[in-house]
Image (cartoon, grey):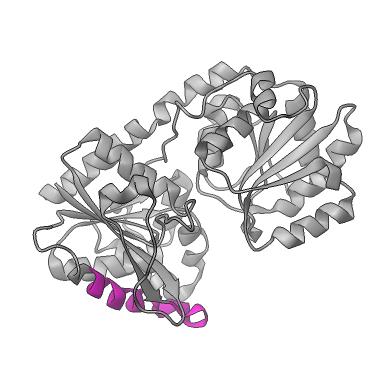
């Protein structure tokens, strides 16, 4: 079976973290069925560039023969970007080998990616499986032109996969056909993200064994609400009888602002800016942590929640998006913070530091969310789409 993957969310050597969940899914699909012939067209938005993009794929992704292209992107006239993406996509498709005949197209990110793909695929009579990941449903459905394009796309594609029921309900409430939308949660590498005693993990990272450690993993973006996390951490640091450190793995445009906030709060000696890390390093930091913190304004079901649970650590989250769909059946609502209040979040941190759940039970609950199980669900959808 030939499958074409089209999205801006696919990694390269300079941005190895970009679209990691997508490329991991492709590897899981290939592991499930080695006969699959998967090819990747990866796009990068640009105001000025067009055509092929000179980017090097990660060595592990060469099996998908990824090709990179620029696509025009107008930030102030965003509602027409799917039309511009479509022009770039038509040229990219023309570059595919003549013996490659996709039976289905997988298109993560609803706008402009999946909207453009659905228009092009309709001309080629190829079924499309679109994937809603988070902000493409949370934010774009509140923008009139983008919402119009997404709802039109929802009637052209074979199905839209959402990574939480919250996203599924949001799409349907805005007008997407109910039968066209279904939820498949992301997977988690249960072998890499597994419980290890704090002492072992901290020795490997050269960290004090008896200190408390909080961890954030993600992009430094406004949607992540990191101002609340820093304010809450400052309260915990002031109240705890033991040294409390907060480690931040990631990067993004807010880094300088966050460093300034850390200085203003007087907690510079307690906060570690670690930069971006690969999965194995993230897993080791999760094993060393007492809790993984997420203070987002909105989310789908972020990978960090699954990875935290699989590592046997509590994901301490604001109760937004689809997070409760995963956390509540396992931990109840104890570690879901209802308000954006620093005192409330700090109280939840102190609770998990003093009364942590048993790690092996959290890891066991994540076995159903393995990437193998996730890939099997996608494979069923792709196979059905190709045969209809």
280 vs 109: above or below? above
Residue 312, image x and y in percent?
58, 24
Residue at the spot 52% in from the left edge and 34% down from the top edge: 280
Q: Is residue 176 left or right of residue 292?
A: left
- The region drawn magenta spans 73-92
Q: How many numbered discs, if any?
A: 0
161 vs 380: above or below? below
Residue 79, image x and y in percent?
43, 77
Instruction: Tell me if residue 81 is in the magenta stretch.
Output: yes
Residue 117 appears in the rendering: yes
Residue at the spot 65% in from the left edge and 60% down from the top edge: 222
Looking at this view, name the residue that lies furthest to the left: 99
Which quadrant of the view contains residue 31? top left
Q: Is residue 97 left or right of residue 292?
A: left
Q: Is residue 202 left or right of residue 95?
A: right
Between 333 and 135, the one lying in front of the other is 135
Residue 90, image x and y in percent?
23, 74
Between 248 and 228, the one lying in front of the other is 248
Which quadrant of the view contains residue 378? top left
Residue at the spot 31% in from the left edge and 45% down from the top edge: 26
Instruction: Tell me if residue 320 is in the magenta stretch.
Output: no
Residue at the spot 48% in from the left edge and 66% down from the top edge: 140
Between 103 and 183, the one lying in front of the other is 103
Between 147 and 270, the one lying in front of the other is 270
Residue 335 appears in the rendering: no
The kind of secondary structure the magenta stretch mainly shows is helix
């Amino acid at each position: 079976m030939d499958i074409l993957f089209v999205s801006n969310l696919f990694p390269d050597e300079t941005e190895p973290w970009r679209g990691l969940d997508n490329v991991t899914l492709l590897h899981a699909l290939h592991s499930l069925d080695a006969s699959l012939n998967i090819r990747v067209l990866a796009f990068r938005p640009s105001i000025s560039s067009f055509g092929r993009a000179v980017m090097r794929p990660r060595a592990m992704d060469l099996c998908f023969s990824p090709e990179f292209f620029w696509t025009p992107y107008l930030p102030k006239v965003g509602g027409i970007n799917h039309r511009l993406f479509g022009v770039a996509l038509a040229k990219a498709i023309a570059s595919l080998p003549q013996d490659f005949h996709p039976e289905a197209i997988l298109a993560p990110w609803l706008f402009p990616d999946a909207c453009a793909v659905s228009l092009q695929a309709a001309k080629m009579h190829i079924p499309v499986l679109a994937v809603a990941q988070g902000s493409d449903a949370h934010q774009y459905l509140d923008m009139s032109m983008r919402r119009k394009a997404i709802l039109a796309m929802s009637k052209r594609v074979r199905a839209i996969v959402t990574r939480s029921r919250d996203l599924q309900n949001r799409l349907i409430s805005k007008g997407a056909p109910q039968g066209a939308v279904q939820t498949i949660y992301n997977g988690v590498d249960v072998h890499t993200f597994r419980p290890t005693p704090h002492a072992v993990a901290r020795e490997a990272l050269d960290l004090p064994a008896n200190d408390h450690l909080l961890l954030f993993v993600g992009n430094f973006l406004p949607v992540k609400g990191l101002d609340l996390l820093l304010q809450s951490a400052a309260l915990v640091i002031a109240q705890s009888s033991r040294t409390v450190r907060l480690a931040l793995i990631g990067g993004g445009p807010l880094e300088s602002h966050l460093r300034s906030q850390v200085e203003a709060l007087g907690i510079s000696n307690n906060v570690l800016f670690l930069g971006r890390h690969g999965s194995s390093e993230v897993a080791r930091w999760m094993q060393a942590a007492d809790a993984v913190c997420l203070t987002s304004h909105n989310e789908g079901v972020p990978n960090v929640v699954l990875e935290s649970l699989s590592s046997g650590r509590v994901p301490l989250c604001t109760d937004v998006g689809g997070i409760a769909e995963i956390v509540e059946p396992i931990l109840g609502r104890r570690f879901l913070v209802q308000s954006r209040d620093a005192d409330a979040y700090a109280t939840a941190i102190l609770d998990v530091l003093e009364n942590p759940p048993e790690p092996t039970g959290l890891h066991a609950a994540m076995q159903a969310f393995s990437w193998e199980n996730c890939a099997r669900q996608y494979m069923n959808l792709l196979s059905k789409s190709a045969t209809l």
